[in-house]
């Protein structure tokens, strides 16, 4: 049961994948968000390449819990993925995952330029690990 997770953003989209047992998340890649018209197709192709049986999309909420325009865009992407892939798509609250990814990379001594390259996929891995841990309970 391999799961693919997406951390949607306006410029970059982080992607992570689980191990075949659906236990451990690992960062996979970062895709450009543009062109937006082909994003869902690119993600579905990646999911098929990774043999994912389920997709997880990060739902960006404000700290207050309210949904802003980013959440609306994430929900639209999740629906596009559901339609294009035929796979189950689950949304997971991603509040503070980008900040946590940045802190983890900083603590690891990763350079600023490299952090920019890695932070979205590490955030996707955090989203995915949250999902995997909650689904095992």
Image (cartoon, rainbow, N blue to C red):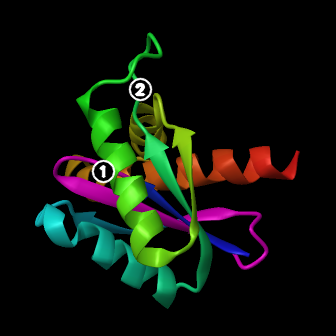
- The verdict on residue 17 being magenta is yes
Given the current orientation, which residue lies at the most extreme bottom position? 49
Given the current orientation, which residue lies at the most extreme right position? 137
- The verdict on residue 8 being magenta is yes
Up-down relation of residue 4 to residue 99 (above or below): below
Which residue lies at the image location 79% right of the left edge and 74% below the top edge?
A: 21
Where does the magenta region start and end?
Answer: 7-26
Up-down relation of residue 38 to residue 99 (above or below): below
Given the current orientation, which residue lies at the most extreme left position? 35
Pointer 2 residue: 61
Horizontal and vertical percent position of residue 98: 40, 38
Secondary structure beneath disc 1? helix
Up-down relation of residue 87 to residue 48 (above or below): above
Q: Is residue 18 visible?
A: no
Earlier along the polypeptide chain: callout 1 or callout 2?
Answer: 2
Q: Point out the image quarter for the C terminus.
A: top right
Q: Is residue 9 left or right of residue 93?
A: left
* Gap in angstroms between the C-alphas marked 1 and 2: 23 Å
Horizontal and vertical percent position of residue 52: 59, 78
Secondary structure beneath disc 2? loop
């Amino acid at each position: 049961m391999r799961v693919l997770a997406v951390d949607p953003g306006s410029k970059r989209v982080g992607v992570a994948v689980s191990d075949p047992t659906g236990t451990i998340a690992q960062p996979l890649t970062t895709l450009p968000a543009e062109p937006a018209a082909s994003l869902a197709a690119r993600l579905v192709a990646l999911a098929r390449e990774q043999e994912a049986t389920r997709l997880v999309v990060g739902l960006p909420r404000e700290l207050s819990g309210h949904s802003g325009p980013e959440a609306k865009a994430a929900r639209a992407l999740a629906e596009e993925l559901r339609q294009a892939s035929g796979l189950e798509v689950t949304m997971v609250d991603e509040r503070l995952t980008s900040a946590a990814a940045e802190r983890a990379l900083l603590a690891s001594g990763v350079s600023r330029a490299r952090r920019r390259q890695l932070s979205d996929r590490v955030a996707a891995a955090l989203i995915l690990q949250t999902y995997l841990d909650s689904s095992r309970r």
